[in-house]
Image (tube, rainbow, N blue to C red):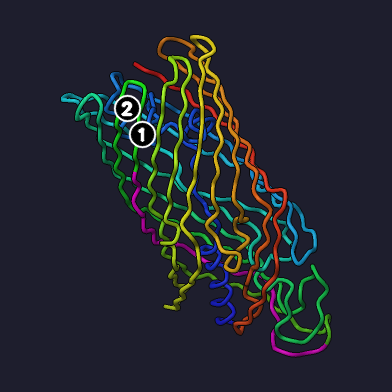
Amino acid sequence: MKKLLILAAIAAATMFAHGAGFGIYEASARGNAMGGAVVGDTHDATAAYHNPANLAFATNVMVSAGVTFINPYCDVEVNHRSQDRMNPGWFTVPTFYATIPLPFDFAFGWGNYTEYGLGTKYGSRWDLAADTRKTTMEQVTLNPNLAYKITDWWSVSAGIRGSYIRFLNHKKPFYGETFNVAIPVPPGSIPAEADLNSRLKGDDWDMGWNAAMTFKPTDDLSIGLVYRSMIRHKIKGNFDLNGTVATAPGGPLPGGIPLRQYHEHTYASAKLRLPESLTLGVNYNVTPRYRVGSAITYTRWSSLDKIDFKIGGGHGYTQKFDWQDTVRVGFGMEYDFLDWLSGRIGYTFDEDPTSKHHQSTMLPAGDRHIIGTGLGFKITENLTLDLGYNFIRMNNEHYFVTYAAGPNGEKNTKRMSCRNGFSHLVSATLSYSF
């Protein structure tokens, strides 16, 4: 049964390689509401994420704390057969930022935020439970930055990004398949040969870096540029496989096959590259009360050309896939209705990097259209509260999922459709200037 363990583990680890674009860009309520179009003009401590070079223009110590709640869901079909809706519930993305002006036109900034993450949850006995049932990937970035104001219109910054990532995947290996005896299995039933549940869990710390600059050609025009490097994680953890299996190949019809309890526990590791990205943003003050902005982010998802991993006993496996580089474009505007009240709206188009022929159910694929809106409240001279809401509409897509169908290397492919894919995002950021 050691071979069964290894192949089931490989199938689970393959999940790690096939997720759709899993970037998280929701770093502040103001930025969310304006489609991320605050790169050129970030006037509070959230600049530590949006553009650390803007920290150099700070004149006061500032702190910002916030949270974004995310709820993704979609209707699912497998080989044109309707399934339970994919709905993992609400995810929480907290943030914290601080800015400290320093002598000689330097400034220090600190950011705690999330750059990557995903979460999916399907019915325990849906038709692709052999590929995945539930997947969660959580990541947090700890990002100190040092910014310098070269002139009144030009600043630069550099920082270190410490990244912690944790991954958890549950599935039912070989669910709906027969691999010991040729017995027809009705859709949605468990084969007599195996009733297994697997869990793959691991985490890792690693480092990257970032650099940024801001140009202010005029008092009303600001241009920002931010580069984030690749981070090379090596996830280490454990793989568990539990359930029942047939004691021998072949045998009588269901009910006569002897089963026994099966349990294995071993280590697992996988190398994962978080891609580099480059963001360009432009902001313009049309009037003292009316401001507009845009931002475009290029992400080199094609750098995830493969994932190498090991499962117990020195066994290795390389999973290749075909992702493409993507562009994310956002536009936003902001208007001060009153001295203490601002309104914001924005739109973002977020391109999906995955291939229809190299896909998994870990995160449904599809280009995303994001509409944002929000309000900013100046509660006191030093205290502000930003609120935001975003609605994400994901394009309907169908793609092919290949998974392990038996312990001797058998593969099966099914067509999965994701329709009516939506997400709700609710965010709030509280900022204080000392």
Q: Amino acid at mark 2?
A: Thr
Foreground: 28 or 419?
419
- As drawn, the label of residue 274 is none
Quadrant assignment, res 142? top left
**Residue 190 point in image, percent of width and height:** 77, 71
Q: Amino acid at mark 1?
A: Ala
Is the residue 175 above or below the residue 388 in the image? below
Residue that appears at 65% across and 50% down: 395
Query: In the rendered structure, does residue 137 fall within the stretch colored magenta?
Result: no
Foreground: 62 or 154?
154
- The residue beneath circle 2 is 99
Dominant SS of magenta comes to strand
- The residue beneath circle 1 is 48
Is the residue 396 above or below the residue 383 in the image? below
Q: Residue furthest left?
A: 104
Magenta stretch, residue numbers? 227-252
